[in-house]
Amino acid sequence: MSRIPLATAGVGLALLISGCGGSDNDRERPALGGSSSSSANRAEAGTQTAPTQTTTSRVEVVQAIGDGKFKPEAIYKTEAPGVVTVVSLFGQAGLDSAPSRGPDPGSGGGLGSGFVLNGSGEIATNAHVVTQGEGRDAKRARQVFVELADGNKVEAKIVGDDPDADIALLKIDPKGLDLHPLPLGKDSDIKVGSPVAALGSPFGERQSLSVGVVSALDRSIASLTNFQISGAVQTDAAINPGNSGGPLLNADGKVIGINQQIKTNSGGGEGVGFAVPVDLVGRSLAQLREDGTADYAYLGVSSVELYPQLVEEFDLAVSKGAWLQEISPGGPAQRAKLKGGGDTRTFQGRPFKTGGDVVTGVEETPIDDADDLSKAISLYKPGDKVTLKIQRADEVRDVQVTLAER
């Protein structure tokens, strides 16, 4: 992911990380909050897309869906004091050159959001807000500053960053500060259609609130590595460059995700935003708190999901599962003698490798598709032994695999 100005961010449909940081490749890229001269595209006078009308309409919709229990004003009053703006300095930039209304790609500074975890001064944000580059080679910001809701601006230490989940843990000195921790929810509490609120600093506009609903669950989105983030929350709450690292809250004011990406044609939010799910956030933060890094289990397969026409075309024995296409050489799956696909056949315009195993379960967890498999494996640690239930032709087998580290 590269640091690109908004002027060039709207060419084609791209999945954009809505904050700062990243490295140069052709995968998903971050959209930086621009300066005041290049901030959000505003509707021309007299059109039917006035921002205030859109916001009001969305509030009315989510209040109706929430049966009157969703009160954005109350959420803002209670939780906004715990939301912070994160300013990262790279290279030789000084704080006086840091952007006041979003990152200026030429200044060596970037701006994102975050939130207070506890009274000891821990702050959660996205890794791409405080790093540049990808994976383990990403470089941390030279300095990071946190601006609290009450106007206090303090320097923060990067305790650790997790490129696989795009999570970073910061620490500030709590002495003399009035900190307002935000409570964490659970993945099991997230339902499609539930109202949500996003808090952060879109385009550098600090302490901003937008509202919407959970549009979908269990999305797979890009991380800062070659692995996907499974179980992501999709929302139509307005998320824009600068919202990265800020909380996505449910009607109870609990954090259910950290806002991370937007899908856009224009470089701004268009109603398709994504958040890292809260259970993964919690797991990542726990590891970062312990030793500054986070480790994830690795199976070493690529797979596709099944659907009725595919099952019929290839005469598969099961209707649900993750159909293995490729097995990584020397990886855990190969050592356990899992079978990938062989000959390639094209069906409905897409190539499939035939003859591979279908994974239908991991321990007691049923696997309905490829995303289920990724999510299930992500819950384990490197070195764990897990039993996979597989369908090989007409035979059901249990295969034990010792997971490796990514």
Image (tube, rainbow, N blue to C red):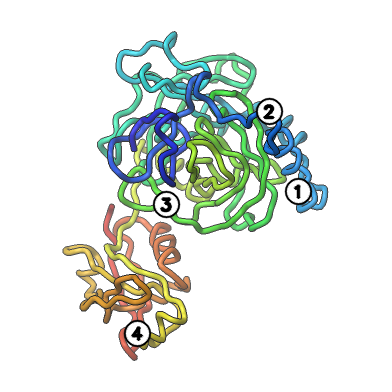
Residues under labels 3 and 2: Cα distance? 40 Å
**Which of pointers 2 and 1 indicates the residue nearer the eye?**
2
Amino acid type assigned to the residue bearing label 1 in the image: Val
Q: Earlier in the sequence, mark 4 or mark 3?
A: 3
Residue identified by numbered label 1: 61
Of the numbered discs in the image, which one, if any, rests on residue 229? 3
| Element on which disc 4 rests | loop
| Element on which disc 3 rests | strand
> In the visual, does 135 lie left or right of 320?
left
Of the numbered discs in the image, which one, if any, rests on residue 96? none
- Name the residue at 40% across, 34% down: 128
| Element on which disc 1 rests | helix
Q: Is residue 296 above or below residue 316?
A: above
Residues under labels 3 and 1: Cα distance? 29 Å
Q: Residues within 10 Å of mark 4 (few under 14, many from 20)?
A: few
**Which of pointers 3 and 1 indicates the residue nearer the eye?**
1
Residue identified by numbered label 4: 314
> In the visual, does 158 lie left or right of 134?
right
Q: Residues within 10 Å of mark 2 (few under 14, many from 20)?
A: few
Amino acid type assigned to the residue bearing label 3 in the image: Ile
Q: Earlier in the sequence, mark 1 or mark 4?
A: 1
Q: Earlier in the sequence, mark 3 or mark 2?
A: 2
Q: Residue furthest front?
A: 46
Of the numbered discs in the image, which one, if any, rests on residue 45? 2
**The quarter of the displayed image where residue 79 is located:** top right
**Which of pointers 3 and 2 indicates the residue nearer the eye?**
2
Residues under labels 2 and 4: Cα distance? 56 Å
